[in-house]
Image: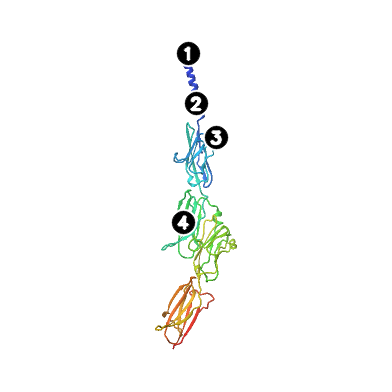
Amino acid sequence: MAGYILLIFRCAKCFVLFVYTFLFIVKFSRNSFIVVGPSKPVVTYVCEDVVLPASLSPALNAEAFEVNWFTTDIRSPELLYTNYRISRQSDTRRTLSIDNLKNGNVSLIIRNVHVSDEELYKCLVYSGQRDEETQVSLTVEGQFLGAQPSITMSSTEGQKTRLECSAEKWNPQPEVTWRDMNGADVTSQSTIKSEQDSEGLLRVSSVLPVKEEYNVFSCLMRSKSYLPEKSQTDVFFIVVGPSKPVVTYVGEDVVLSASLSPALNAEVFEVMWVTTDFSSPVLLYQDKRIKKQIERRKAMVLDNLKFGNVSLIITNVRVSDDDLYKSDVKVFLLLFTDLPLFCVSLVLGAQPSISMSSTEGQKTRLECSTEKWNPQPEVTWRDMNGADVTSQSTIKSERDSEGLLRVSSVLPVKEEYNVFSCLMRSKAPKPDWPSELNIYSTSLIVWY
């Protein structure tokens, strides 16, 4: 009996052990899962939002689990969910939907995708008893990027002038093409470099050395992967200016003509007129208004912009206006810009007069003087027989407060009867001046 009881007890014990083992297996099954991810890389584009899918199978409630998304180092997570909250984020752009955890969805959400987000991501889920993981490869394509390029001009002493065409936020690196005013491709003369910013996008810069002569250059940046035909042709234009320097006179008004070809409506474009420094524009038209103006004498006719006319008007011209002017025209999403060059030459001169003076012990001298000249005129002295005696004279000049020249020429003379004339001739005479003499004055000297 005792043996029977013992046997029964043992059997009962075996039965209890069996039941216990069975119950343990059932409990363990309820906590068993795997993490399922996509079989192919996830493809997205820069600036878009993307979901890296990951879910538990079976779809257990993961609210009490720990979810760790990381790339290369589990100790530096991109996102860590633990104790019912997101406790770490490498960047606020990375998150997950806490409401979806109850359905076993542990997907990572990345907002406003950067090029630098392209990585192999791993998702580790820990239930408290076991952990499982999966991995998701993210491919970022940025073919549709490209900020508008701009051209700047610089030169240093002893070096050639150079144009730099630069743009930011490109990926992949665009093709850069330089053309001159005749449409000839001069890209082979340029150099190009690029560097990545904090977002992994490229800042592209192309430098073209140029000769110091009149020309117009355009810089075109084109995506290698994708660029609609519209952005290559419909927005193409060049800025056309005069083929020769513009000549005007002090006190007059002058137009530095510049127009778009074809004659696009430039009301929504940016127009900047500069001389030597792009950071200090003579005039800046932007957002449909003139935003900067170095002085009111320099202006534009806004009504003419609709016809592609971007000319600069300078009223009451001064000597200080004599400079090399550049027009930089930009349009939103335009892929190139041009720099026509202009020069204002000033020609003027007041009529000279002759005065005579002498002091004790000194020879008599004639002084021919005039004011308001620029550039310095040629001076010629002749005697009563028409002989050129200029070589016997001296000349000096000084600028007044307006930057104009006061010119004075002195001729020593002998104390004998003679007549001298002083001729001042502009190197670039006004059209309405006499062809033979620009300005003429005489003085009669009587010997005594």
Of the residues shown, which amino acid type is indicated by label 3?
A: Lys
Q: Which mark is residue 25?
A: 2
Tell me the amino acid under the disc marked 1.
Answer: Ile
**How much space separates mark 1 and mark 3, taking CA atoms?**
51 Å
Q: Is residue 365 above or below residue 265?
A: below
Location of mark 4 (residue): 206
**Residue pushed farthest left?**
361
Q: How many neighbours does mark 3 have within 10 angstroms: few (below 14), some (14-19), or many (20 or more)?
A: some
Say which label, 2 or 3, has the lower sequence index. 2
Residue 312 appears in view = no
Residue found at x 50% / y 22% = 19
Separation of disc 2 and disc 4 at Cα?
69 Å
SS at mark 1 in the image = helix
Is residue 61 or residue 42 the one in the foreground? 61
Q: Earlier in the sequence, mark 2 or mark 4?
A: 2
Question: Marks 4 and 1, how far apart in space?
Answer: 98 Å
| Outermost residue to the top | 1
Count neighbours of disc 1 (C-alpha within 10 A) and say few if under 14, some if 14 to 19, many if 20 or more: few
Percent coordinates x, y for residue 400 in the rendering = 48, 72
Image quadrant containing the C terminus: bottom left
Q: Residue at x 48, y 15 (%)?
A: 8
**Residue at disc 4, secondary structure:** strand
Q: Which mark is drawn over residue 102?
A: 3
